[in-house]
Image (cartoon, rainbow, N blue to C red):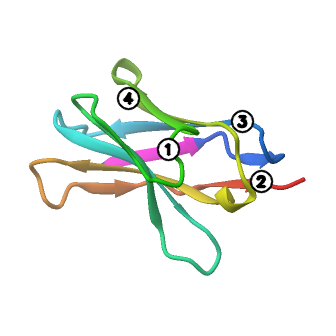
Amino acid sequence: QVHLVESGGGLVQPGGPLSLSCVVSGNIVSHYVMGWYRQAPGKERELVATITSGGLTNYADSVKGRFTISRDSAKNTVYLQMNSLKPEDTAVYYCNVRSIVIPNYVYWGQGTQVTVSS
């Protein structure tokens, strides 16, 4: 079993920064993709950013240049640094981990609310 626990959400003014963390515990595989997704009210869950066990990153066009995903393998933690936040970034942010080689190895965190408002 694998557990993901997100933290760092909250209320922030437009243009401000916010940082999210996700600690992964349990049966952690060697070759994985970890990512952040978000879901706004009335919308489908969408990809925000991913990072592989090899360090390759990928970003949604809407967050490129503003968000940075990183990881600390020793702490089994993935981070999302969000800068220049916009009201449209308001959503519940979810952490995800999936194996590159094991099809049913997919796990989600419980989500953390990010609200961008003045």
In the image, which is nearer the foreground, mark 2 or mark 1? 1
Amino acid carrying mark 2 in the image: Val
> Residue 64's mark?
1
For marks 2 and 1 on the same chain, the one whose residue lies earlier in the sequence:
1
Q: Residue at x 68, y 46 (%)?
A: 9
> Residue 8's mark?
none
Q: CA distance from mark 2 to mark 1?
A: 18 Å
Identify the residue at the far right of this view: 118
Amino acid carrying mark 1 in the image: Lys
For marks 3 and 1 on the same chain, the one whose residue lies earlier in the sequence:
3
Pointer 4 residue: 76
Q: Magenta region, mostly helix, strand or loop?
A: strand
Pointer 3 residue: 17
For marks 2 and 4 on the same chain, the one whose residue lies earlier in the sequence:
4
In contact (CB < 8 Å): disc 1 and disc 4: no
> Residue 116's mark?
2
Q: Secondary structure at mark 3?
A: loop
In the rendered image, residue 4, in percent from the top left (x then y), is placed at 44, 46
In the rendered image, residue 77, in percent from the top left (x then y), is placed at 43, 30
Magenta-drawn stretch contains 5:
yes
Q: CA distance from mark 2 to mark 4?
A: 28 Å
**Magenta stretch?**
2-6
